[in-house]
């Protein structure tokens, strides 16, 4: 049974990764602060909590096969915990694997970093993630037995996401009433990927440890992009909403907005992974999840 420590397990993606790992029979340790909460999608059969203040003791006693770092701070509001979450914490966990002399560290990043910090409003996030990778590579050059994989995720969506995210927030508005919804022109192109397909990508990396390079990056997406405008119209259709409510072009586009992003899935596809969920099925599942949330 593989022992896996997960940071960010209480978040949207983390919950689906937990489900995927539990189905594999892994022993799961979830790092938490004070609140031991999980998203409604999680089936926490054998989860073991590790409180942040007890992390040092835990790392001294528990040998780990893998660390999956999903916790992140975006620094949108000048959050002082950005460096702790994106740099200091993952370095501590990587050093712990280094003391063991073996193991896999799976780092999580977003498509914003791959684009070279082109979105100014996320520049602090991008810089912190890049700083961690640079320091991690320096550490790995001085150790042996460890492997370090970065999964760079495209636009992830699906059930149990936070209501303040764009897609679930849009669905909530479409289901709530018949009021118009004001939007930008929606010409940005994104690679939308279903969260359960993303969860399986972490399994693919773990399953192929022996084939991994010492340090390797992977894009995780469908490998194709569509305009945000088209995605919004498809979501409205799944909500049985009048598309005339969608008022495109009424809002200014965000300064420094990234206009195109798509994953190069060639590396991870070599491990047998593909995004197998159709966009239509993924949208339907996401709408269904929001409906259940708003009616309970």
Image (cartoon, grey):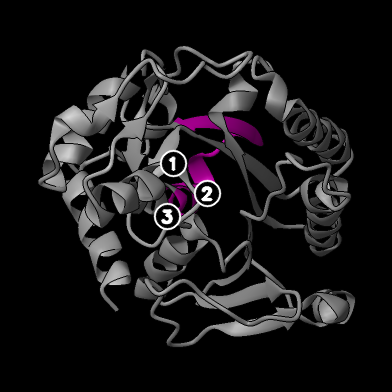
Q: Which residue is mark 1?
A: 166
Q: Residue, x 89% and y 39% (percent of image)?
A: 142
- Which secondary structure lies at badge 3? helix
Q: Is residue 290 above or below residue 178?
A: below
Instruction: Please indicate, yes or no, whether residue 225 appears anywhere in the rendered image.
Output: no
Work out whether mark 1 precedes mark 2 in sequence or the reverse, and give the earlier one. 1
Q: Which residue is mark 2?
A: 209
Q: Position of residue 58 (x, y in %)?
A: 80, 80
In which image quadrant can residue 258 be found?
A: top right
Q: Which residue is mark 3?
A: 203
Q: Position of residue 95 (x, y in %)?
A: 86, 55
The answer to the question of whether label 1 and label 2 lie on touching residues, with beta carbons closer than 8 A, is no
Between 116 and 67, the one nearer to me in the picture: 116
Dot 2: few (<14), some (14–19), or many (≥20) neighbours within 10 Å? some
Between 64 and 159, the one nearer to me in the picture: 159
- Which secondary structure lies at badge 2? helix
The magenta-colored residue range is: 202-219
Q: CA distance from mark 1 to mark 3?
A: 27 Å
């Amino acid at each position: 049974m593989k022992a896996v420590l997960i940071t960010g397990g209480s978040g949207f993606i983390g919950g689906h990764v937990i489900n995927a790992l539990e189905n594999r029979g892994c022993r799961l340790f979830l790092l938490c602060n004070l609140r031991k909460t999980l998203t409604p999608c999680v089936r926490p059969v054998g989860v073991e909590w590790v409180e942040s203040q007890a992390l040092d003791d835990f790392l001294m006693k528990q040998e780990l096969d893998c660390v999956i770092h999903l916790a992140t701070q975006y620094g949108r509001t000048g959050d002082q915990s950005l460096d702790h979450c994106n740099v200091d914490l993952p370095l501590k966990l990587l050093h712990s694997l280094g003391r063991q002399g073996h193991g896999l560290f799976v780092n999580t990043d977003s498509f914003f970093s791959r684009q070279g910090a082109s979105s100014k409003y996320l520049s602090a996030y991008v810089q912190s993630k890049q700083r961690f990778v640079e320091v991690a590579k320096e550490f790995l050059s001085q150790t042996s037995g460890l492997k370090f994989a970065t999964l760079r995720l495209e636009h992830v969506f699906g059930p149990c996401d936070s209501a303040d995210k764009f897609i679930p927030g849009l669905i909530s508005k479409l289901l709530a009433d018949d009021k118009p919804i004001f939007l930008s022109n929606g010409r940005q192109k994104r690679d939308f990927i279903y969260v359960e397909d993303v969860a399986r990508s972490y399994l693919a990396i773990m399953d192929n440890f022996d084939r991994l390079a010492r340090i390797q990056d992977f894009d995780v997406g469908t490998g194709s992009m569509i305009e945000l405008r088209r995605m919004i119209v498809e979501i409205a259709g799944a909500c049985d909403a009048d598309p005339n409510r969608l008022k495109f072009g009424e809002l200014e586009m965000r300064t420094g907005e990234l206009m195109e992003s798509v994953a190069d899935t060639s590396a991870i596809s070599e491990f047998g992974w593909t995004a197998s969920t159709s966009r239509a099925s993924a949208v339907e599942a996401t709408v269904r999840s929001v409906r259940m949330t708003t009616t309970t």
